[in-house]
Image (cartoon, rainbow, N blue to C red):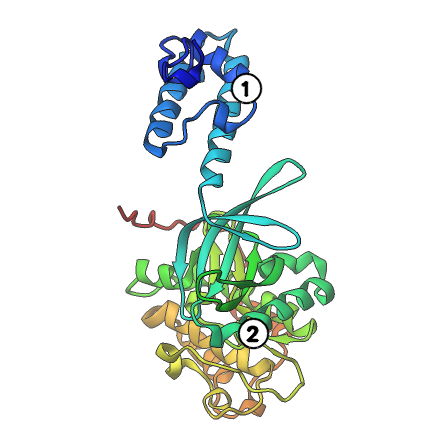
Amino acid sequence: MSRGSGEVAEGSPRTADTPADARAALAAARRPADLFPTDDAEAARVYRRLARLLHPDAATATERPAAQDEFARLNALWQRRTDATRPTLTTRRHTYSLGATRATGDLAVLREATYEQDGTRHHALLKIPRAVTDNDLMEREAEALSRLARRGEPRHRGYAPRLLESFRHRDPDTGVERRVNALVPLDGFRTLTEVRAAHPDGLDPRDAAWMWRRLLVALGWAHRAGRVHGAVLPDHLLIHPEKHGLVLVDWCYSTPVGAGEHVPALVERHRDSYPPEVTGRRPATEATDIHLASRTMGALMGERTPKPMRAFLRGCTLPAEARRPHDAWRLLAELDALLDRLYGPRTFRPFTMPEPARHQ
């Protein structure tokens, strides 16, 4: 009897009771619809049943390689089925299947997404402005990241996110058009806001030292490529605890070096951290970033900051922009000399962070 009669065919995924039945159903499937029904709840039940029957842990040692291939194919078909039911954004280059919201910032929502290219599924992070009035800031970020990729020294490329593309998306229901930046995701990174929360009594200056050094490298690299970041704040600084990596994110507030432009917007809750040229809407320079970076690092260490470091930080946060350091590379050399006097030759210090809270 045909399936059209309403009777379930023997050996279909919904009646698979043995690994042999499950393998036969998987081998016959060429697309997700061949394996999973249209009803979402029923499809999930079918996937769980097949996953249980085909899991490599249930296979013998000799069968395990083939079982791993089958399990991977099952998951690939399930992922395709899942992606097909998600909302999508289509550009000239890719079709992005939207996933969960990773974070909500001052200007934008960060949505996880996937896209296929050359038969391979890739991950992306879509930065979508919360208000259309911030489209210009998204464009500013895209311009900055593109310039850093073109003009920045390649060996320091990892200090900023990588832009996949920037595009306009019109909401089909409201007609509202937003500028969206598609970025390569950063996995395993934590913000300095999280680091500070994990060390409420102040971070050990010896741990802050590697973050500070990498931040000055990031700023020196960006400034030589012709860009002032304009918002070197704890939320915009990501560190990788195990690898001692650092990435400076959120380039929406950036300005060209030497253009005489002011920072286009500020993060209101951090108003007291900004130098006078930002709050006074005067031109931003390299010294603007150095001031912000110094305030961020000083706050991270808090009361644990040694007296010589406090003096160093005061020189970097003078009210007069012209009196502050402008060259991040030269400042890095001065910081290294200070660290050597305080702690001797540099040694690697493992750094860990508590696991982030998981929300149900």
Residue 7: horizontal and vertical position, in percent?
36, 14
Residue hosting label 1: 69
Q: Which mark is residue 11?
A: none
| Front label number (1 vs 2) | 1
Residue hosting label 2: 229
Q: In this picture, is 329 found above or below 90?
A: below
Residue 260: horizontal and vertical position, in percent?
63, 89
Mark 1–mark 2 distance (CA, rounded to whole Å): 46 Å
- Residue 343 in sight in this render: no
Question: Which part of the image, by quadrant, shows the N terminus?
Answer: top left
What residue is rendered at 60% in x and 87% in y? 261
Quadrant of the image occupied by residue 115 = top right
Q: Amino acid at mark 2?
A: His
Q: Between disc 1 and disc 2, whose residue precedes?
A: 1
Left or right? Give the position of 162 relative to 188.
right
Q: Amino acid at mark 1?
A: Asp
Residue 83: horizontal and vertical position, in percent?
48, 40
How crowded pointer 2 is (Cα within 10 Å; few <14, some 14-19, many 20+) is rated as many
Residue 76: horizontal and vertical position, in percent?
52, 30
Q: In this picture, is 256 found above or below 351?
A: below
Q: Foreground residue, 52 or 158?
A: 52
What residue is rendered at 70% in x and 65% in y? 152
What residue is rendered at 44% in x and 61% in y? 173
